[in-house]
Image (cartoon, rainbow, N blue to C red):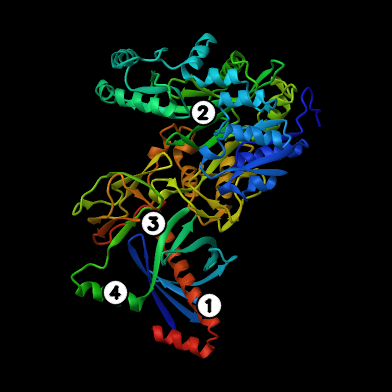
Amino acid sequence: MAELRYSIELGGRWLEVTLEREEGKIFAQINGKRIPVELKGLGGHGVYALALGDARESMILTRRDGRYQASLAGREISVAVEASAIQELRRHLKATSTESSAQQIIRSHMPGLIVKIRVKPGQEVKSGEGLLVIEAMKMENEIRAPQDGVIEKITVQERQEVKGGQPLLVLKPTEAGEVPHEP
Amino acid sequence: MPKLQKREIRRVLIANRGEIAVRVIRACRELGIETAAIFSDADRWALHARMADQAFHIGPPPAQESYLQSDKIIQLAKRAGCDAIHPGYGFLSQNAEFAEEVERAGLVFIGPQPESTRLMGNKLAARSTAQREGVPTLPGIDEPVSDLKAAEAAASKIGYPVLLKAAAGGGGKGMRLIESSAELKDSFERAVSEVKKSFGDPAVFIEKFVAKAKHIEIQVLGDEKKNTVHLYERECSVQRRYQKLIEESPAATLKKSLRQEMGEAAVAMARAARYRSAGTVEFIYDAEQERYYFLEMNTRIQVEHPVTEMTTGIDLVREQLLIAAGNAISFRQSEIEPRGAAIECRIYAEDATHDFSPSTGRIEELVLPAGPGVRVDSGIARGDEVTLFYDPLLMKIITWGEDRATAIARMKGALRELTLVGISSSIGFHLQALRDPRFLDGSYTTDFVKGLQQEKLSQADLERVALAAALAYEHERSSLQETDHTSERAQEERWRWQS
């Protein structure tokens, strides 16, 4: 029986999933449970039908920046999937390197104007804390820390115009804690 | 089909876009009226432009250069042989000068007369009208405050907290909450200059702030034969940054006697303004004291008009068209008998993970809900590009049920059926709101949104997403393998390699 092991990262947490094929069916192991599973694409734009045992549901999974963006009953969460072998290698590298590979670049998600920068390099921030304010569409949008961490670098200034996707700051997350809010 | 008397309206130009333009086009079609749409560069193949009989390019994407170009719009209407212009909501709908120019050009403006718009557009004038008509208004000073000293005197007389409001403002704009005299001293000058910049008119006045308030409004209709009716209330207390998100009728906790009283007060306001066409009189309702206060009158068809249409069975946009053609309102006050309960959820393109700022992108997939008691007023279609140039309202879902619980259950079902791929939307927010005990028992007030906790996904949810992601990943990889014409043997090899 052949096995595929994956490490799934969602909301700062890691979950291990093992997929096994047995007589044409797929079984998944997760958190000590073993269930028959099946996924069917409906139409090719990221809408899927998911069967977990007898339970059925629809889910949206789209690709974004090398990760999946999952939508479950209107709530969105960003997911990364890695084959476990690669995950172990990464952990090994992290442990032996002096520079942390876990850096998070926080980007602007829309074009606008930086009106206020609330933090300084070296400052510790908590998940949800306001980092800076971008003005767009006559509204002020607060950019918040996605998780606990330390501000490593700030790559913009107040009164600067930014494009969508432009890097704003670099956050070095502290060790993964709770699942952050992604309603 | 009622004859269009007095004035023939054979062709209408819709000076708007998105879902309301679609709505007006539908109403025109039913009456056999031809339609002309306008579109900016961003809306060249938008749903409303495709649905109309004719469509005209109006300018580049920014509203200032397109949907607000009143002269161009009127010229186009004449060129296209239109008899009338429907302004929708937002844009030029409450612009009295535009309404006047339309009339001067010999066209019919589908809405109230400019004088009514002017009267109700000035908050102070509207307030004094209310007082004259015996309609309760919030404790406040009825003249603009000329300086900080006058403001301080007014505020201490009324009692903090107070609202500093722009006389020329409306729809939540030009308002500032002041909690103490220190705060007033601090921000008065700045507030006045902001108001002057936004509205041209620096006049501000002070009003009492009701902490636990419900926003309840009454739909009215008036015609040129001096008939005025009300179509009962809508409650719109679920708001974020003064933008309504959920509306319903009837207002769950409003006494029958008050409902009647407020309806009559709204009619009095409409009569005083000699109001024609559809309008809405907004009130602040103090749930603790069971008292209502006139807030403002909106001189246009509103986003949430379908809620009233569902409970009364009356087509408000159709009434607007008939009234504009010189007909009397199609029914009498006594014939209006609301039935059941209706709820509307405004589906916005917004990113909940970024403080609900507007979301942009291409709509890759769109599946709309259906079923008994489910209505969808959509302005978008699959393949549309959602940009930042306009209000991010994508569509409205409205449900009706024999009782409130049924309407809510239908709405939850509809929200789950709605499939939108390519942009983030407010679906998650709406589902969360509809689970909240304060919404379910009807006690919610205008600070409802603040009390919503950011919801964490449960362990079970996380597991399901993880499984789906693993399967999707595996599915993608094996499809790639298949297109490489890899043999089954090689697939076996790959499985073995991994473990």
Label 2 sits on a secondary structure element that is loop
Instruction: Give the Cα separation between the discs numbered 4 and 2.
Output: 58 Å
Instruction: Give the Cα separation between the discs numbered 3 and 4.
Output: 26 Å
The quarter in which the C terminus of chain B is drawn is bottom left
Label 3 sits on a secondary structure element that is loop
- First-in-chain label (3 vs 4): 4
Same subunit, tags 3 and 4 = yes
Instruction: Give the Cα separation between the discs numbered 1 and 4.
Output: 26 Å
User: Residue drawn 54% across and 33% down?
Assistant: B90
Circles 1 and 4: CB distance less than 8 Å? no
Q: Please name the residue that numbered disc 1 is placed on.
A: B479
Which residue type does callout 3 highlight?
Gly
A123 sits to left or right of B161: left
Q: Please name the residue that numbered disc 2 is placed on.
A: B253
Q: Please name the residue that numbered disc 3 is placed on.
A: A165
| Chain assignment, label 4 | A
Which residue type does callout 2 highlight?
Thr
User: Residue drawn 54% across and 45% down?
Assistant: B60
The front one of A110 and B359 is A110
Q: Position of residue B198 (x, y in %)?
A: 42, 29
Q: Nearer the viewer, mark 3 or mark 1?
A: 3
